[in-house]
Image: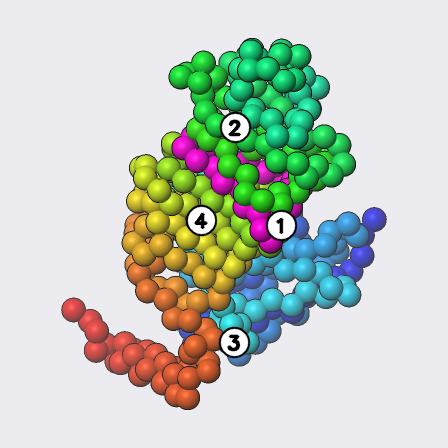
Amino acid sequence: MSHKVTAHVSVNGDLGTDYKIQIFDADPLSPGSTAKLLAEGTVNQSTTLNVVMDCATALDKVFVARIDEHKRYLVQPVAIENGTVTAHFGDKGTPTRSISRAVTTSIPVMEAPYTADFISAKKAISTVIQANWDLSAKSGWGGSYGQFPVFTESERWFKIQEGTFKAGFSATGNRDGEISAVKVIVPQGSTWVIENSNQFSNITEIIVENGGKIEIAKNGSLILTRASYITVMQGGSIVGDRGIQITNSSAGRTNYNAGTIDCDFLKIDGSGNGVDFVNYGTLKLNSYNASTNGTTLINHGTIEVENIDGNNNTNIKNGCYLKAGKLQFGFMKTDGTLIVKNTIDRKELLESKEGADYLLATIQEWREAYERGAYDD
């Protein structure tokens, strides 16, 4: 079934410049995208595009693309509210800054590391985790470990029980190479509540399945050290009052999110050669901090973050939609990487007596000088 949705799209761009607008039912920049074009038109700083679209009733948001004369795409996901979509590109009424990317840049793409069928098959053979287990224990350690064959295996698959699970557990090492991997599935219908700090060392992958959920309480945190990392499948989620800390660059293993991560912080620190954190879903944070050299945040989804920190190690390759509570500025490499060098805090700027007016006046002065050719070499 379908219904009519009215879209209103405006821009605050260059004077006299027409921008092509396209509206899709899915992200047109995701790899292998099958996004359907719902409507299109042209808009400039003096006009608004008003168009009626035929949308599936199950569709709760659309993706609005602004395309400039160089065919650079800036895409916003916009919610459908009461049969209406309202999108604006530029700084008019927008307290945050979006970063665009041209479709010709070399932003890496990544397929989902697992299929739903593969995870379903692994769930069937996985061992349900018990409270206070060390998932890297040996079967001869005593207690209940000897009762479960998984503790004799090199690659170990575990899962969180159905319903809510609040007990602590850990994985403390690879036992001098005897264990190649520890996989923990948070399955559909399961909620793992982390009430204190849960740390996983060396070889652990946390996999959140479609319909699975991790909740991080105000005194908790998810800590992944050495070669440990996370995979959030589409429909999975990590939410909470605290956040995720990844140390030692996950030993180069890629962290992947196609679901929802909505928590206080994502911190990537410690030694190592850097790691990719790839987002195809929604990533909402109060703070993103990447202090490990070579770390890159690659975005093909939606990122909303209040503070971006990490000095020269904060490398971002943005292929869709990113907004930040601080004005981030630095320089863009030819491969599409944004390296953040400095920030202007939104709250401090607006609360200062003259800061915002001075900044606007300075930018206008620069623009006028640029249009006169004052900066031509």
Reading the chain from its start, which is encountered first: label 1 or label 3?
A: 3
127 lies above or below 34 = above
Tell me the amino acid under the disc marked 3: Lys
Q: Which residue is mark 4?
A: 267
Q: Quick one: which residue is furthest to the left in this view?
A: 377
Q: Which residue is mark 3?
A: 92
Residue at x 38%, y 38% (from the top left corner): 249
Nearer the observer, disc 1 or disc 4? 1
Reading the chain from its start, which is encountered first: label 4 or label 2?
A: 2
Q: Which residue is mark 1?
A: 217
Q: Which residue is mark 2?
A: 171
Q: Are marks 3 and 2 in contact (CB under 8 Å)?
A: no
Closest to the observer, 25 or 290: 290
Reading the chain from its start, which is encountered first: label 1 or label 2?
A: 2
Tell me the amino acid under the disc marked 2: Ala
Report the side of 67 relative to 33 (left or right).
left
Reading the chain from its start, which is encountered first: label 3 or label 2?
A: 3
Tell me the amino acid under the disc marked 4: Lys
- Magenta highlight range: 211-238
Give the tally of numbered discs.
4
Residue at x 29%, y 79% (from the top left corner): 366
Measure how far apart labels 1 and 3 are at the Cα level: 37 Å
Reading the chain from its start, which is encountered first: label 1 or label 4?
A: 1
